[in-house]
Amino acid sequence: MNGAQSLIRTLVDAGVDVCFSNPGTSEMHFVAALDTAPEMRGVLGLAEGVVTGAADGYARIAGKPAATLLHLGPGLGNGLANLHNARRANTPVVNVIGDHATYHKRYDAPLESDIEAVAGSLNGWVRRSESTADVGADAAAAVAAAQDAPGRVATLILPADISWGDGGRPCPPIPPRTAKPVNEATVKSVAEVLRTGEPVALLLGGDACRETGLRAASRIAEATGAKPFIETFPGRLERGAGVPAIERLGYLAEQVAYQLDGTRHVIVAGTRPPVSFFAYPGKASDLVPEGAQVHTLAAVEDDVVGALEDLAELVAAGTEPVLAQPQRPELPSGELTAQNWVQVIGALLPEQAIISDEANTSGLLLPGATAGAPRHDVLTLTGGAIGQGMPVATGAAIAAPDRPVINLESDGSALYTISALWTQARENLNVTTVILNNRAYAILRMELQRVGAEGSGPKAKSLLDLSPPELDFVKISEGLGVPATRATTAEELAEQFSRALAEPGPHLIDAAIPPLL
Amino acid sequence: MNGAQSLIRTLVDAGVDVCFSNPGTSEMHFVAALDTAPEMRGVLGLAEGVVTGAADGYARIAGKPAATLLHLGPGLGNGLANLHNARRANTPVVNVIGDHATYHKRYDAPLESDIEAVAGSLNGWVRRSESTADVGADAAAAVAAAQDAPGRVATLILPADISWGDGGRPCPPIPPRTAKPVNEATVKSVAEVLRTGEPVALLLGGDACRETGLRAASRIAEATGAKPFIETFPGRLERGAGVPAIERLGYLAEQVAYQLDGTRHVIVAGTRPPVSFFAYPGKASDLVPEGAQVHTLAAVEDDVVGALEDLAELVAAGTEPVLAQPQRPELPSGELTAQNWVQVIGALLPEQAIISDEANTSGLLLPGATAGAPRHDVLTLTGGAIGQGMPVATGAAIAAPDRPVINLESDGSALYTISALWTQARENLNVTTVILNNRAYAILRMELQRVGAEGSGPKAKSLLDLSPPELDFVKISEGLGVPATRATTAEELAEQFSRALAEPGPHLIDAAIPPLL
């Protein structure tokens, strides 16, 4: 058994049975070894940003990591932005990065580069396999490292000769470090804060955004008057009818200031105290209201759900959570707007949907329109590196083939990783992509004003415009193998969205929507 | 004057007047400042790989750097692969990477990451501006560093508050370090090698691949019997009728072994001794024939052209170079093949063309077909990170608006940076893209065999196939704003290629070509 075969066997034995791949020559033995492990599914992406984003989306839904297969330093570079998003989502990912043979590195061949330096920037786990006999153990360690609570990006660098060498030994799974229980004293001290009667905000992140955590948070809020919030960009948020509807903190510092106005205590549970996404001249970076105290119920690596349930027992025994009631908007009519397209989605969202949300400015009104829709998951842009939505949708659909995946995607963001559509077509995934096509980097138009940039004129404006030429997403999508239609009215969007959901396989709708702002 | 304004003014004063851009919020003051400097042209790319590859192509033709504008660490990550190619081409590039405000970094906001670590992997020059007053000097230093012989990637990290702060001071240009003259003793000792009468290979790289260097090399070869070769992947190679036709070293180690068979001395001039692109089991990495001696006439940072001319004076006084004669293949007919499509290009290549060559396996026969075509430049895949051809073509066309740019592009490679087409359309660039569409990563099919990977089956094969679904490059191109046609016969390719060249603006031809191998 060669190194590559021992690697794949170890991954499969540890439950990692999907490998999103964009291989090159140095990964050919890994590619060949796929045929020795029937359990391992190889999924090709035409660019590494698709591969890494798909691994992120997969793990958010599957609850376990996928592997990626990347080609040396440039392959990692191309995939880095979506690994950054995965890192910020605390998603477990196992990167396998092929490298030159050990004896070849000193020749500084054209593709030689410092893979460790780039992988290290992800603040995760990085190891280079030093011998074929160790590859199995390295792989088991990588899977465990990826799954150590709360989850991270683990990168295994696999030199070509270590991969093709004989003497590979599969290694049994290594148990990952589980989430740390929160001690009773901490829970009690937070309970004391809640009993002061002073205004409290309860900020939820990580696993607290799943149903069990949300129910506990809702009970606490009901019993104590604390105001619960979801962190701005949760990795995975469960919501919809039957789940407590808890507001997300806004993207804009001004929104957060409004949401937290008057708060005396901020309790953080599975996340960190709120900070501004960007700095703005003369505005605060720290969004904890002045004079408010921060109390950590559970850090990101702690068992936040257990802590919330313990806290609920202390302060909300006997109190029931408040669940969102089934309620959908009416189907709107007329020209599409930033206001009415979300109503179409809210009116028609299918059962058990997964929403990959990269709608950005166009999606500001989405949460209200879908709050009472059937229960669904929302996967958000955790790290702020755009180009995430389509790959994440792709990976989510691989993880949950029986659930409809809805990718709400800004035009500007779509173009970074558009070839994800091809992977959706090849794998016949049930992904419905709605392009919110406002022909601009609308968020940057807003930001240009917000940062107080003066003196900007036509050249600045031009760098924020996506037209001319107009992007024709119908043609692009069809060219990549995904059937597509264009909607300019609410009726058209409703009809096309319904049809896309009813037919198996991927679809794309190019929805012409004027900028909200 | 704010920091951004002083930066742009300094760039312009140093001759850097094109900025390929994909900005975000942290770069908004830079974007606004563009309107204060009429000389600076901002060119939008829809993905950072387009931005960095265009900067590479621009500088290869313009002979001076362009700037890039990138958004924090993820923006740099997305652009890293083509910066790797630029690094391997010794192309001068000035990256401007926006970062969070200095006081914002400690909050570890979602887009925070280690930019220095990633930029440092390029082995170039990296600096972070520490104060607004210093931005001008930092920018002048960056431009000089980029142009220090032989050229490199310089990265200036610009925190948002340093950019928007008042007190910017433009800085006059700083002269870069010029190429080091080669001393007389070195030239004389190489002349002695040439006089031994033993078989000598003269390996040319860098500026030696331009006309003056090639003429000197040709004279040396004529007078001494030395066999000249161009390095495998030159950044810019001048060739065609009237220029000495010098063979390139092959991509495959087996080719190089054949080319250098019997050589006793390898003289390197502006490059390094030949090494295998990848390692293969049981094959050598070092491609210098066993027993042959290596002599360095000029290292990569030396004045290689001056050294070649000095050497020619010593060993080839009075000898004329041998120039390629005008000669074109006949226009072929019938179904397109890997053999005849290159004849169409050779027959119709216009005067003063620039070829951005990412044809990979499909282009193996191209050099022969174009050797006697009108004088042209060829820009090659220097670092082996595919996804370079379309962005490099884009940048080259910005640098030389009066020259026709021909992008010969493999289907697999095209999909990494396909949105370069949109920038070509927006800027109305004279780029004709020919997609060599063989529906596979054909080079990897070959490499799978070459690395001796055994046991591969349908899953391995599937990871090297680009179909199903079939990519429809005509639709993709039209969707991105570039008119496109499909050619399946040599006659169609000839007709469409001629028409594309005759009309201003970009065009794409999807050429269906069976795999060569």
Image (spheres, coloured by chain):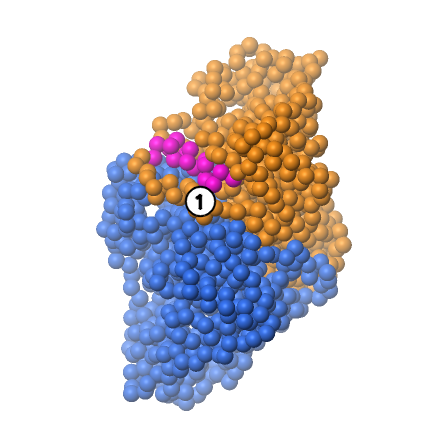
Chain colours: A orange, B blue
Dot 1: what SS? loop
Give the image location of residue B249, x and y in percent: 49, 75
Q: Is residue A69 above or below residue A375?
A: below
Q: Is residue A35 above or below residue A199?
A: below
Q: Quadrant of residue A31?
A: bottom right
> Can see residue B440?
yes
Residue under the point 75% across and 55% down? A37
Give the image location of residue A175, x and y in percent: 70, 41
| Amino acid type of the residue that numbered disc 1 sits on in the rendered structure | Ser
Q: Residue furthest bottom?
A: B197
Q: Residue furthest front?
A: A334
Q: Is residue A31 above or below residue A230?
A: below
Q: Which residues are magenta?
A: A436-453
Residue A438 shown in magenta:
yes
Give the image location of residue A74, x and y in percent: 52, 55
Q: Quadrant of residue B515?
A: bottom right
The front one of B311 and B392 is: B392
Side (left or right) of A474 relative to B74? right
Residue A388 shown in magenta:
no
Q: Residue furthest left?
A: B172
Give the image location of residue B9, x and y in percent: 27, 47
- For the N terminus of chain B, the image quarter is top left
The front one of A376 and A181 is: A376
> Can see residue A306?
no
Residue indicated by mark 1: A467
